[in-house]
Image (cartoon, grey):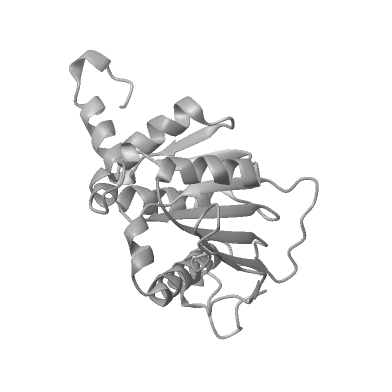
């Protein structure tokens, strides 16, 4: 898909959201016998084809800065044409006592955001995107998703503790540590850009590090 002639190709954020084909979704919110309560959405870019070279990545995208950075990094620097990205968003299990339609709409909004960001980063890239919106313990859900999708790598943020604790859940810092020690596949830990810059400035100012940064 190419930008309309009246729009500059250097401004993908101004372009309309690309056409994605919705695939079969799964909803077990209403099933008391389900082994895992979840709302799953899947879309594929027009022309997407899975091949033997397709890579699968699982991104734990918490709703805080760290999770957003991890998701943005996946879309900007990791996934390539023909890949599949599994985005996992954990929510507090108590939400199952509330209106499930609200949860479903939140998931749909997140999926639309992911599609738009993917298009902004590379408008010609063909991807399969799966969103897993799952209430419950984060580590248990991650273990099940890794077993289900068998990703090539898992991507997590470094922090986000307050965001998860605000929902009565384990902190994202603990999630990254858990993945590093328990995941059967490689783990990529993404640090927020501002923290990387802050540490770089600190290292530059350290006289013990010599003149490597000049």
The image shows residue 8, relative to residue 97, as above or below, that is below
Q: Which quadrant holds the N terminus? A: bottom right
Residue 93: in sight, yes or no?
yes
Pick whichever, 51 or 99, lies toward us.
99
Residue 151: in sight, yes or no?
no
Give percent across and percent down for residue 65: 31, 52
Pick whichever, 156 or 40, lies toward us.
40
Residue found farthest to the front: 33
Give percent across and percent down for residue 140: 47, 42
Q: Which residue is drawn at 52% across and 61% down?
A: 121
Residue found farthest to the bottom: 6
Q: Which quadrant holds the C terminus? A: top left
Pick whichever, 190 or 182, lies toward us.
182
The image shows residue 72, relative to residue 6, as above or below, that is above
Q: Residue at x 51, y 50 (%)?
A: 74
Q: Quadrant of residue 6?
A: bottom right
Q: Which residue is drawn at 56% across and 46% down?
A: 145
């Amino acid at each position: 898909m190419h930008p309309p002639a009246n729009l500059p190709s250097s401004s993908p954020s101004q372009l309309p959201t690309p056409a994605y084909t919705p695939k079969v979704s799964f909803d077990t919110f209403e099933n008391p016998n389900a082994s895992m309560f979840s709302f799953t959405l899947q879309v594929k870019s027009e022309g997407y084809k899975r091949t033997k070279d397709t890579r699968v990545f699982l991104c734990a995208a918490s709703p805080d800065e760290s999770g957003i950075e991890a998701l943005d990094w996946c879309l900007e620097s990791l996934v390539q044409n023909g890949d599949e990205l599994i985005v996992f968003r954990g929510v507090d299990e108590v939400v199952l006592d509330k209106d499930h339609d609200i949860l479903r709409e939140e998931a749909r909004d997140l999926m639309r955001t992911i599609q738009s960001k993917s298009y902004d980063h590379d408008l010609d890239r063909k991807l399969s995107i799966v969103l897993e919106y799952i209430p419950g313990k984060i580590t248990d859900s991650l273990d099940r998703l890794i077993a289900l999708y068998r990703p090539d790598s898992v991507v997590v943020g470094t922090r986000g503790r307050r965001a998860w604790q605000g929902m009565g859940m384990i902190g994202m810092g603990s999630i990254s540590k858990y993945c590093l020690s328990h995941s059967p596949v490689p783990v990529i830990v993404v640090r927020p850009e501002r923290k990387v810059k802050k540490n770089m400035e600190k290292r530059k100012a350290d006289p013990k590090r010599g003149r490597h940064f000049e």
